[in-house]
Image (spheres, helix red, strand yellow):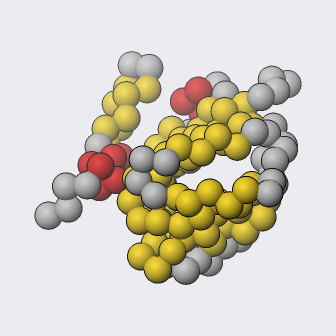
Amino acid sequence: MDHSLFSQFDNGTLLAGKATYALAQHPWQPHKEYPGVFLKTLVSAEHTGGLCTCHMVRIEPDHAILLHTHPASLELHEVLQGSGVCHMNTLATPYTPGTVGVIPANTPHEVRAGAHGLQLFAKFIATRVC
């Protein structure tokens, strides 16, 4: 049995307002643009009035989320398992368990998994309210 923190959240509980949700019932979805990347939404925009979303991200070995930006949200990564690298501006930062990455809104970045894959939490916090 896998007792990793990533697995615990995969099968954990979401408390949102007056309701609780079993996270094991939230499906993993393949990323729309990047093969070998899978997302599981833990907290959706509907839970936060559009201010924040939280996702588990699983990047298969030697796959990547290629260069992109998020114009209206800051992105926060918490690396839980595996290894890889985050490219942002002129920096290439190793992603290993315990690394936290803060990516300002509208900043080009990409995340590449190493030979054993990469698992992280990605949180998106709105920087502009319409």
Q: What x and y, as percent, mark residue 84?
A: 53, 67
Against 112, residue 109 (above or below) is above
Q: Quadrant of residue 19?
A: top left
Residue reaching furthest to the left? 1
Number of marks in the image?
A: 0
Against 28, residue 55 (above or below) is above
In this view of the protein, which residue sits in the foreground, 106 or 95? 95
Can residue 60 be seen here? The reply is: no
Q: Residue at x 42, y 47 (%)?
A: 98
Against 1, residue 128 (above or below) is above
Q: Residue at x 38, y 59 (%)?
A: 81
For the N terminus, the quadrant is bottom left
Residue reaching furthest to the top? 18
Q: Quadrant of residue 130?
A: top right
Q: Is residue 110 left or right of residue 108?
A: left
Q: Is residue 35 left or right of residue 100?
A: right
Q: Residue at x 31, y 38 (%)?
A: 13
Q: What x and y, as percent, mark residue 24?
A: 32, 52
Q: Residue at x 80, y 23 (%)?
A: 129
In this view of the protein, which residue sits in the foreground, 103 or 90? 90
Can residue 130 be seen here? The reply is: yes
Q: What x and y, as percent, mark residue 122?
A: 56, 47
Q: Is residue 3 left or right of residue 106?
A: left
Q: What x and y, as percent, mark residue 55?
A: 52, 48
